[in-house]
């Protein structure tokens, strides 16, 4: 009897072709995966800044202390003013995120102890890929919300 074990040439060609097709699909999609990850990182950073704005406003109401934000192109400084001194917290942006529109350029956003703000405005963030998210602060009650896109 002919009891040879092994692969035929056709089986090898089919296997190598399938591996090649799978490899090319992975390489094509790796760019899309990287872009998706960059977009999610950007959204997470902007949401973190948004939640920090809301938290600073609420903390000002709770402890009766005035807070202010200095917004720059690549960072934000939050200051808490109290009789014992001023506490400053710095938030740096990562992965190429930057502020492209800032109503508060050259001034500050002040969160008063009663929950109001000194003036309304918008801060638009942009990722390396061009995605934009905007934090809007409304005058009066100081409502803060997040919206997609720029101004």
Image (cartoon, rainbow, N blue to C red):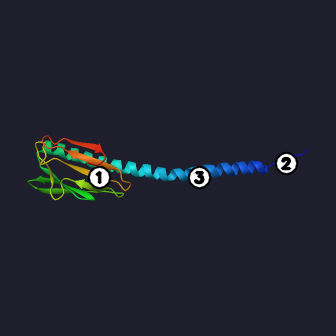
Q: In this view, does 111 lie to the left or right of 11?
A: left
The disc placed on residue 4 is 2
**Is 45 on the left or on the right of 80, as rendered?**
right
Residue 28, image x, y percentages: 54, 52
Q: Pick whichever, 78 or 101, lies toward us.
A: 101
Label placed on residue 24: 3
For label 3, count other residues whose C-alpha is less than 10 Å away and answer few (under 14), some (14-19) or many (20+).
few
Q: Residue furthest front?
A: 151
**Spatial distance from mark 3 to mark 1, Cα to Cα?**
35 Å
CA separation, marks 3 and 2?
34 Å
| Element assignment for label 1 | strand
Classify residue 134 as left or right of residue 2: left
User: Where is residue 107, by image quadrant?
Assistant: bottom left
Q: In which quarter of the image is the N terminus?
A: top right
* Secondary structure of the residue carrying numbered label 3: helix
Residue at 27%, 49% (x, y): give it. Answer: 49
Asked if the residues shown at circle 1 and circle 2 are in contact, with their CB atoms under 8 angstroms apart, the answer is: no
What residue did someone put label 1 on? 125
Q: Indicate which disc, 3 or 2, sits on the residue closer to the N terminus.
A: 2
């Amino acid at each position: 009897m002919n009891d040879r074990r092994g692969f035929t040439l056709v089986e090898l060609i089919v296997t190598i072709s399938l591996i090649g097709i799978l490899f090319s699909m992975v390489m094509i999609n790796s760019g899309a995966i990287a872009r998706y990850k960059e977009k999610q990182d950007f959204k997470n950073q902007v949401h973190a800044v948004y939640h920090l704005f809301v938290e600073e406003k609420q903390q000002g109401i709770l402890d009766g202390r005035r807070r202010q934000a200095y917004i720059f192109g690549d960072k934000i400084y939050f200051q808490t003013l109290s009789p014992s001194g001023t506490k400053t917290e710095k938030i740096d942006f990562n992965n190429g995120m930057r502020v492209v529109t800032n109503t508060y350029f050259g001034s500050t956003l002040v969160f008063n102890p009663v929950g109001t703000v000194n003036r309304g405005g918008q801060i638009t963030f942009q990722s390396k890929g061009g995605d934009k998210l905007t934090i809007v602060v409304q005058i009066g009650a100081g409502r803060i919300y997040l919206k997609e896109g720029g101004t």
